[in-house]
Amino acid sequence: MELFMKNSSLWGLKFYLFCLFIILSNINRAFASHNIFLDLQSSSAISVKNVHRTRFHFQPPKHWINGSVWGNIIWAHSVSKDLINWIHLEPAIYPSKKFDKYGTWSGSSTILPNNKPVIIYTGVVDSYNNQVQNYAIPANLSDPFLRKWIKPNNNPLIVPDNSINRTEFRDPTTAWMGQDGLWRILIASMRKHRGMALLYRSRDFMKWIKAQHPLHSSTNTGNWECPDFFPVLFNSTNGLDVSYRGKNVKYVLKNSLDVARFDYYTIGMYHTKIDRYIPNNNSIDGWKGLRIDYGNFYASKTFYDPSRNRRVIWGWSNESDVLPDDEIKKGWAGIQGIPRQVWLNLSGKQLLQWPIEELETLRKQKVQLNNKKLSKGEMFEVKGISASQADVEVLFSFSSLNEAEQFDPRWADLYAQDVCAIKGSTIQGGLGPFGLVTLASKNLEEYTPVFFRVFKAQKSYKILMCSDARRSSMRQNEAIFGAGGKTCITSRVYPTLAIYDNAHLFVFNNGSETITIETLNAWSMDAFFIHLQSQNAVNVHTVHRTGYHFQPEKHWINAPMYFNGVYHLFYQYNPNGSVWGNIVWAHSVSKDLINWINLEPAIYPSKPFDQFGTWSGSATILPGNKPVILYTGIIDANQTQVQNYAIPANLSDPYLREWIKPDNNPLIIADESINKTKFRDPTTAWMGKDGHWRIVMGSLRKHSRGLAIMYRSKDFMKWVKAKHPLHSTNGTGNWECPDFYPVSSKGTDGLDQYGEEHKYVLKNSMDLTRFEYYTLGKYDTKKDRYVPDPDSVDSLKGLRLDYGNFYASKSFYDPSKNRRVIWGWSNESDIFPEDDNAKGWAGIQLIPRKVWLDPSGKQLVQWPVEELETLRTQKVQLSNKKMNNGEKIEVTGITPAQADVEVTFSFASLDKAESFDPKWNDMYAQDVCGLKGADVQGGLGPFGLATLATENLEENTPVFFRVFKAQQNYKVLLCSDAKRSTLKFNETMYKASFAGFVDVDLADKKLSLRSLIDNSVIETFGAGGKTCITSRVYPTLAINDEAHLFAFNNGTEPITIESLDAWNNIV
């Protein structure tokens, strides 16, 4: 991209002409402890995604100024105290009511009297994209982050009349108040190719009346989007509130032109009495006019910042590397440009922009150059900084204008970028080209030059500024501020060689006039905006955010599926919170269950059968290799639930990106015998020997009986409820996320055939306790009845998949490895009502686990999928280490905050096992752990691992065994005790002692343990996976390199570490 700069003074004894401010942004690496799920990126895409992902630009996975790209669904929401470090919150607005059920598009915010903020936004009311204007207000003004927003039922505020194109009626501006006490807003529109800014007025902000004429319009400019209208001061860089009235003020009208995809503006006068804006005579009103940025920059928005008395502008830059044959998406798209202060140039003819001063806090390693001469053809390398992530300011000078080339009069009708294409950096000139060669490979196979070229016209000099990406890549982003911010260009480039430490930065001159580098200051730039985290929250955000667990912002597991060599994870993204009641089905894909690509959501509310929510469900592969999703749709505000289906739009797409919800939905409506608000989460379907499909849904009857309701279908379209449920249990409350599948009685292989010869698992997530319970039993295929085995406890005292923070799990059969894989969700447990800084993320998917039947036939066994072991690095080993009572041994040589540890303990005798108190028989295991913690000395135990520990154990989460002697056998207790996990205290914080008993034979006098430690999560697998416990912990001291790992024994019986293998789980 390129442009001609406005008139700059060129005369004087010495010619100081150009100031360049270059911002280059490129991720040099992943985190120091590489997050394998970093922004849902895949290993196959790392060369694109990690390399080109920006480090100090605001970059959620997808975004417009308030969403993704045009036609956005939800208003995402982040907050900051410095415009640099951001906390990601729940989305503020999403489609949920009749006035916006087809989309919540762009808009603006206004601060009303008494400091009351309000959002006005465009709602889309039907599939034809008819648009209205709505408002939303904070639910709680005392919340400093304004997390929750309400859309009152008196919406819409503004409905277009018959004179308006209803499909081009959007993006209301910030409102301002006139001297008559009336509020005013602008809404962009189009009439017969004439772009216009429609004006509306209101006395009370509720009833709006359209003015007889638009504030301004311009012919042949096409549809206007994202209008912005604000005052600017003469002779000052200070900003003004949009309602300011006073002397020495001009006005700016900015519009994003849909046809050109650039942001144009004019400067003029606002006649307040007649509500008309008139551009200055020298302010071109059209496509040849001034642009905010002459590059990849769109949908910008300004706001007045009273804290620094300035106006700030922020624009969006999309991706430009999309190839039609690309099969691997980066997993992210688009960035917000650096926020810029904007003010009126002293000439009054144009705006000036400069990166906000807070950006300079990121400057690190500095290098300087002074008085370096560059003759024709010379190039000088700038060394000592990271050239792929830098901030560079340079001032060039020259002795004479005599060498300036003649400006061809034919170029007067060309855009500046066309002149740049003719006169690129490789074309030798007179006065120029000179400037910087950015993101360059050593031998210049790849580079992006940013340069000046001076031409002599008939009466003046013309200065061309170019950013030329033609040789940027052999197959990231730059923001350039020329002449002190008079001209700005943003480019997106994607080098393949000039990346990381292989990127170079040069200063060059390819003109016959000698150029002097008067001063050059360059800095390596630190990273911010990573995961939208704030510096204030670093000890929570970066430290506790997991490294190798799948962790989108919010999710609830929906429907894992293996299809045509690709693993699909559908999970519910919840714009309204991190708990039940999610809205859209997010979608990610992987080829190894470890590295993931984030795709567009598969399903979201848009039709009458799901307009109030798209809740959980499952995926099934039908004959002919055709996948289908069954999901629960919410049809009204009372949360009435129905079951719907969705199918891929294109089966030839290997990622199944787009899904269709046919109009013959819903498939299943609850009859009068069913609680319609407790009727959800259809399972994967299976086919019986009679050729009928079957599914099960969770429900509740008479307040306490949980049940799995069964439906049958011959064609997958017409479903009939069975006369009785597959199974039900009194006293268990509402069942959620049921899962029903066969397991082999021999070996660890998975099964996908539902025959009577197998054992079966019925798992349910109990809404009452928020734990996952399962039974083992027989499935009578003729009666469609499941009967638990006599020794499989069918109550809240029964077996759990995991005895800790683990919920809403889902299993699927993986034919590629002939296994069944289960995946559970773990929420956060550190919520403080008085916390001012939210982490910006919540909830993780735990490591996928292979699941099979124990040889005893009495329980399941689980173990992390084998692919996880590909992350193991830097192994340490211990063997035959004895620990007496009170002793501990530190495991050194790894990073204990992010590790994978396997250990086998042995002991010589069971004689010192403590007696098991019969009163404990009626207690849950975690209650026994609460009485008999790691710090309570015992006989045979407690012994195990002290994880995420400080050196002196002020903080630690022990994971340990304790052996008791009961009347007829021994009882082995496995605990994960978070009571001392953090010094951060609040009475509402959940620091649980999770525990389960381990059914294990102690004849060999050995117990084994595996723990996956990942900053804020500890997944423990006892006795080869017979008992599993997940804990979420949030240390304040035992973080990063300050975390320690110990093996310990606090029992009188000596314990031997037979073997201990530990790895860093980072790459």
Image: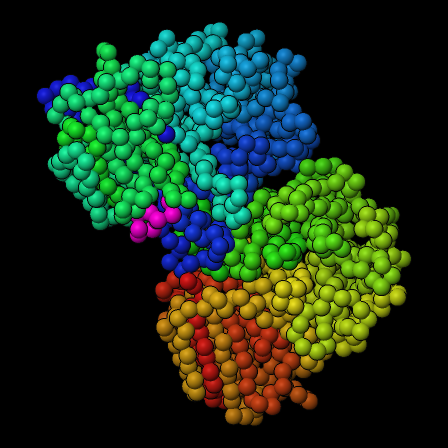
- Residue at 81% of width from left, 63% of height from top? 727
Tell me, yes or no, whether the highlighted magenta stretch contains residue 499: yes
Q: Residue furthest left?
A: 13
Counting every numbered tag in the picture gives: 0
Residue name at image x 42 percent, y 44 percent: 475
- Residue located at (55% from left, 82% from top): 1007
Range drawn in magenta:
495-503
* Residue 132 as seen in the image, left or right of residue 183: right
Left or right? Give the position of 270 relative to 200: left
Give how far across and how far down residue 782 sits, in percent: 88, 66
Question: Quadrant location of residue 926?
Answer: bottom right
User: Which one is in front, 1013 or 465?
Assistant: 465
Quadrant where the C terminus is found in the figure: bottom left
Res 651 seen here:
yes
Residues 2 and 67: in front is 2
| Above or below for 853 versus 417 | below
The quarter of the picture where residue 740 lies is bottom right
Magenta stretch encompasses residue 574: no
Would you say residue 432 is visible in this rendering? no
Q: Is 777 placed left or right of 408 in the picture?
A: right
Residue 601 in picture, x, y percent from top left: 60, 44
Give the overall secondary structure of the magenta segment. Answer: loop
Give the x, y percent position of residue 520: 19, 38
**Foreground residue among 461 and 523:** 461
Up-down relation of residue 335 to residue 942 (above or below): above
Residue sitting at 36 percent across and 73 percent down?
893
